[in-house]
Amino acid sequence: MNTALQSTVSRPTSTVTCMTVPSVLINNNSSQVFTAAASDSIAHNSYTHLNHLLGGPEDFDGNSFGVPWLLNAIRGKPLVVSLVGLPGRGKTIIATKLKRFLLWNKICCEVFHLSNYRRLIAPEFNEHVINEPLKTGEEELRKQCFHMLFEDVDSFFSEGTHAFSVNAAVNGTDGVNKGEVEDVPFLQNVRGNVAIFDFANTQRSHRRELFDFCSSRDYDLFFIETITYDLNLIQLYIKGIELTNPDYLNMSREDAVLKFENHFRDYADSYQTLDDQVEEDIAFLKIFDGGSRCLVHNMHGYMQSKMVYYLMTLHFARQPIYITRHGEAYNNTLGIIGGDSELTARGFKYADAFASYINNLPELKNFSSSIMDHGGQPGVQVWASTLKRTQQTASRVHAPVLCWNALTELDAGQFDGKSYEYIEKNHPQDALHRREDKFRYRYPDGESYDDLVTRLEPVIMELERTRSTIVIVCHQGVMRCLMAYLLDRDFDELPYLDVPLHHLYKITPHACGYEVEDIDFNIPSNEYIRSKERKKSSVVQPPKVEPNYSY
């Protein structure tokens, strides 16, 4: 487990845990529903090849599933997105980020790692033979892997998925040890929209084979090639490979790097980059050096445009993100929803402690010389809402403060300035609807968490784009949404994430997930607690299962 850097400020105490991105799928609130019983073909066709590897159930209950008719019409045909590139060039990072972004936009997608199929069929074979077959037996192995992959993709698009992902196998000592997968209630059978293939695809003949498969099924196909010359980026991509990739488990760092270099040469000798002259009928995006330059060819449709827009804003630096709520405000102590109240004495005490911590960050110690270190962006940026309590909390930090209307708290509409007891007494139906579906419940003339997710998309796009260290001072609902995105929590869990006052969360991205640190400033608050609230979900949890990455 990685260990977070010790804070230079003595007052706060911190709890650190390393996590990986969990497998999640969005079960949309659909007006067009397709239903299949457990006795139908779902139980026999949906990812049956990987059930043995993953230790998942052989069948599952048939539930209603579908996508909203309007979004389905916009999305068009099922889309296969295939990564292209040499090992250690960030393919898995792109696949993981893209999946998280699409799920956040309520687009059902899944990542398929070819190496999982290879480990299932013949775990004794080295990974490189899947891409560069050397013998007849190895060519046959490659064909078997692709055949199983194509069957699973057909099942995903036609029938949906059940509550595990092909990248969620438990890593044991042999790299393929089976284990239980977390049972998340909202993981139900949802027809797939986007399948992401995470493997090298470095030969034109293999890309043509994939093109023919998609054409025969009437699937759209889009390639994403990542080309990296920057040695620092390459080192960033392969950092911790001996801890996260089953092919390198139980190796020293030196042995893992040596094996990786041999693995790289196996691919490099036969590498054929995407060419808009030779492969003019193929749609693709080329990303050079983590987004410093991009080339788009033959792109078409809403889905491909949305993905390209997102991917062209990405950067792959690993600077941390700090997120906190404002200090305690008067309405917090009274249980009043919304409003624009000022900080209490305890709230100002937290603002002082928070500012002391942020002002001692290395990125701020030499602020004047760090202005141009991040492509013209300051080394640290503070983002806050336009309300008094966030402005007062951020005012003591010695860094530029950017005010976002989008970071304003969830709009309670007619109930703004009211208490939850008032709603329970005078509007019992609203209170009931909110308890039944807190994520989708919309306040009269106000917003729901679902609306808030949409409102925060510009913030998330800028968060992915900026190369500065970002410090966000916001509100409970907004913080839950941002934490759910960054930590890849599902929408049903989002409204119950526990984000108490006077805690600062440091989130550091990694190739295999993230590290989250809870910095407790030990300043008490008198925040009103609702007795009927469902038990909250911690944003700091024990380490989850490491996914199988193909790199």
Image (cartoon, helix red, strand yellow):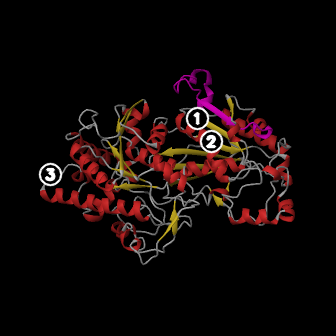
Return the disc, 2 or 3, that comes first in the chain's sequence: 3
Circles 2 and 1, Cβ within 8 Å, touching? The answer is yes
Tell me if 79 is positioned left or right of 419 in this view. left
Q: Determine whether the residue tagged by mark 2 lies in a helix, strand or loop.
A: strand
Q: Is residue 266 left or right of residue 393?
A: left
Residue identifier under label 3: 134
- Residue shown at 77% from the left, 42% from the top: 350
Q: Earlier in the sequence, mark 3 or mark 1?
A: 3
Query: Is 364 one of the magenta-colored residues?
Result: yes
Kindly report which numbered mark, 3 or 1, lies closer to the viewer in this rendering.
Answer: 3
- The residue drawn where x is 82% and y is 45% is 339
Q: Which mark is residue 322?
A: 2
Give residue 385's quadrant in the image: top right
Q: Is residue 523 left or right of residue 262?
A: right
> In this view of the protein, can residue 172 be seen by the observer?
no
**Which residue is nearer to you in this view: 376 or 311?**
311
Q: Amino acid at mark 2?
A: Tyr
**Residue closest to the far bottom:** 39
Secondary structure beneath disc 1? strand
Q: Position of residue 204 (x, y in %)?
A: 23, 43
Residue toward you, 184 or 524: 184
Disc 3, SS: loop
Magenta extent: 362-390
**Residue 530 found in image quarter:** bottom right
Gap between marks 3 and 1, in whole Å? 47 Å
Q: Nearer the viewer, residue 40 or 333?
A: 40
Circle number at residue 469 = 1
Question: Mark 3, residues whose alpha carbon is within 10 Å: few (<14), some, or many (≥20)?
Answer: few
* Three-letter code for the amino acid on which mark 3 is drawn: Leu
